[in-house]
């Protein structure tokens, strides 16, 4: 979750690190739920720093206002994952980090 945009220098390091993890560490996707300002900053640096093949795997959704209140679409838990064919049933918090390709 990203509520305030960081400097471009900070995002340069963050996006470079995400790119490395996408290529070398088996991370499937990096997703930011963020404000519109943070979305613009993340998108700008991802467009600049990631190669074409990895760029679609770093995504951001402008779905929070400046106070951190959800303003995105009203979805039931797991709806977006089901739409993308990526839903995984986890039995509890102990399994959150054990699903394939998931890192926190």
Image (spheres, helix red, strand yellow):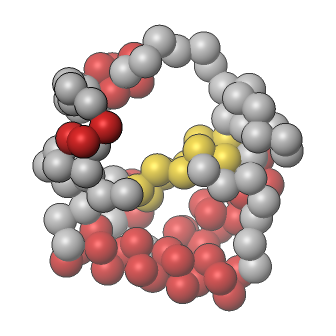
Instruction: Say if residue 37 shows up in the picture.
Output: yes
Instruction: Say if residue 48 shows up in the picture.
Output: no
Horizontal placement of 92 versus 41: left or right? left
Q: Which of 65 and 8 lies nearest the eye of the viewer?
A: 65
Give the quarter of the image for residue 43: bottom right
**In the image, is residue 61 above or below residue 38?**
above
Quarter of the image with the C terminus in it: bottom left
Q: Position of residue 91 (x, y in %)?
A: 21, 26
Give the quarter of the image for residue 10: bottom right
**In the image, is residue 6 above or below residue 70?**
below
**In the image, is residue 72 above or below residue 2?**
above
Q: Position of residue 46 (x, y in %)?
A: 53, 69
Horizontal placement of 12 versus 81: left or right? right
Q: Which of 94 and 82 lies nearest the eye of the viewer?
A: 94
Q: Position of residue 76 (x, y in %)?
A: 47, 12
Q: Position of residue 29 (x, y in %)?
A: 33, 54
**In the image, is residue 63 above or below residue 51?**
above
């Amino acid at each position: 979750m990203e509520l305030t945009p960081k400097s471009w220098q900070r995002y340069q390091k963050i996006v470079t690190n995400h790119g490395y993890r996408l290529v070398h560490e088996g991370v499937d996707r990096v997703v930011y739920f963020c404000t519109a300002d943070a979305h613009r900053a993340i998108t700008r640096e991802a467009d600049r720093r990631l190669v074409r093949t990895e760029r679609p795997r770093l995504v951001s959704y402008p779905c929070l206002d400046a106070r951190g209140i959800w303003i995105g679409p009203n979805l039931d838990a797991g709806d977006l994952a089901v739409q993308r064919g990526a839903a995984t049933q986890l039995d509890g918090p102990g399994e959150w980090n054990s699903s394939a390709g998931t890192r926190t």
